[in-house]
Image: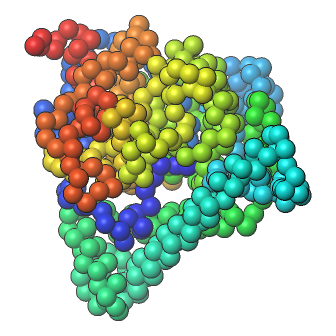
Amino acid sequence: MKNNLLLAALFITSVSFSQKKKPDNWQTLDPMADKIYGVGAEEAYKTLKDKKSKTVIVAVIDSGVHPNHEDLKDVIWTNPKEIPDNGIDDDHNGYVDDVHGWNFLGGKNGDIDHEASELTRMYQRESRKFSKMDTTKLTGDDAKQFEEFKTIRPKYLKEQLQAVQQLQGIKVFSDFLGNVKAANKGVLDKDAFKKYTPKNDMEGKINKRMKAVFAMGLIKPEELESQVKQGYDQVSNQVNSSKMNADSIRQYIVGDDVNNVNERYYGNNHYQGPDALHGTHVSGMIAAVRNNKIGINGIANDVKIMIIRAVPDGDERDKDIANSIRYAVDNGATIINMSFGKYYSPDKKAVDEAVQYAQSKDVLMIHAAGNESKDNDKELSFPNREFLSGGVATNWINVGASGADKGKTIIGSFSNYGAKKVDFFAPGVDIYSTIPDNKYTSESGTSMACPSTAGAAAIIREYFPELKSNEVRDVLMKTVTPYKGKVKVPGTKKDKKKLPELCISGGFLNVNNAAKELLGLNKKK
């Protein structure tokens, strides 16, 4: 599932909005030079001014990307061996007309937008299977699977109940916005909230919070409306997915065999898909054209974005992720951005094998830790670097989200963490970037921390191409900006800990520190 935040739900629950709006490109700034906890990219370019860069291909496995966006069209990867739109697999890689990448969520009958959660798919499959069997007489593998199914059912019912409750909360907030807008002659702006007379106590509480949010410049009213709609669509799909046969819908649209995890060649070249907001935002953070006086500056200055669509509105399938990783590796990507995740992985073995393949080809993989304020040390999320067969991927970075301001709330209140599972924190709160139709907006999530890291890693691979993927990870880990104070533990009211208790490195990503380290410029202690 795309790791973006459902702001509508967050505004109704307890979320801290103590950070004031920062410059649009705050994620590129530096804690020392700018007093803002960005990745230090602007300073890194000053440090690297005497070195030449080598173009790096970053694969973005996501919901799709708008390839003709004004600030991205010049940085989209083009397959040099493929002739566009001739209906021929010119480079013989198994994918016809894959000029800018591939879409594993499409087929001759269209493109998948909404998908069920992995837990829903697991429940549906097992439910169909055992509804045709006498469960009192099961033996062997069937008996074992039935016992597992009995543990899945209450989890599935709990997930559906939570989705219904979340949808109700978003509906309350959406109705409130509609009332405010109607009372202000159809215009939703800051003044509308100031002039509005709440209809009840709930509206009064929401209105008070919203006036504070707008006073701090955290979001624009038009952005709020858009994100509320995103949240409503995503959660309502989760609620409705329980009524549909997810595998049958998939087979009709894509045409692959959902039970064959080893199947490789399916999909189409619809890079944008039905909703490319998330993937376009991620791509802009990594590589939007710098210093062109349009939109924003991406973090990396010499990158090509390979578009791989495999993440629907709902949980991604292990098969698609494994194939996406292999496609990226085989077509020249040296960094893979993975701003998605889930908590069940029935075909993890296939994903593990793809990760091992990427590791053997020296491809760095960067993954978002998740947005549920969970301790990843206690609850596994997928994909991850731990192999079922034993051992861990050394080419893997797992990243949590941080904000711009020094203080107890610098860690995103939504971010997952883990003293043993999360490597460091990177900018992921209120990030302004590209979205379809040549537009821009702010988003928050570990989905944003992931491209912050991918962009920084790309700088290192551009200017130090001799480094292996594990060496890039090592230098980024070694040179994080340390943090002495305590920070608020995500998901808690008062619990505060020091950063080494929340991530392995105990710090915040800083690519300028890494560049200095590689050039021998850091002072020895």
Q: Quadrant of residue 18?
A: bottom left
153 lies above or below 375 = below
Q: In the picture, which quadrant includes the C terminus?
A: top left
Image point 66% across, 67% down: which residue? 240
In the image, taking residue 83 as reference, residue 48 lies left or right, namely left
In the image, taking residue 167 as reference, residue 49 lies left or right, namely left
Q: Count the marks.
A: 0
In the image, taking residue 330 as reference, residue 411 lies left or right, namely left
398 lies above or below 344 = above
Image point 40% across, 82% down: which residue? 176
- Can residue 92 be seen here? yes
Residue 271, given in percent of the width and then of the height, sits at 63, 41
Q: Compare residues 423 and 210 and report the one nearer the observer.
A: 423
Residue 135, given in percent of the width and then of the height, sits at 84, 56
Here the colouring is: rainbow
Q: Compare residues 62 and 350 and report the one nearer the observer.
A: 350
In the image, taking residue 369 as reference, residue 431 lies left or right, namely left
Q: Quadrant of residue 120?
A: bottom right
Q: Compare residues 485 and 172 and report the one nearer the observer.
A: 485
Image point 36% across, 77% down: which residue? 188
318 lies above or below 233 = above
Residue 445, given in percent of the width and then of the height, sits at 39, 49
Residue 381, given in percent of the width and then of the height, sits at 51, 41
- Can residue 65 be seen here? no
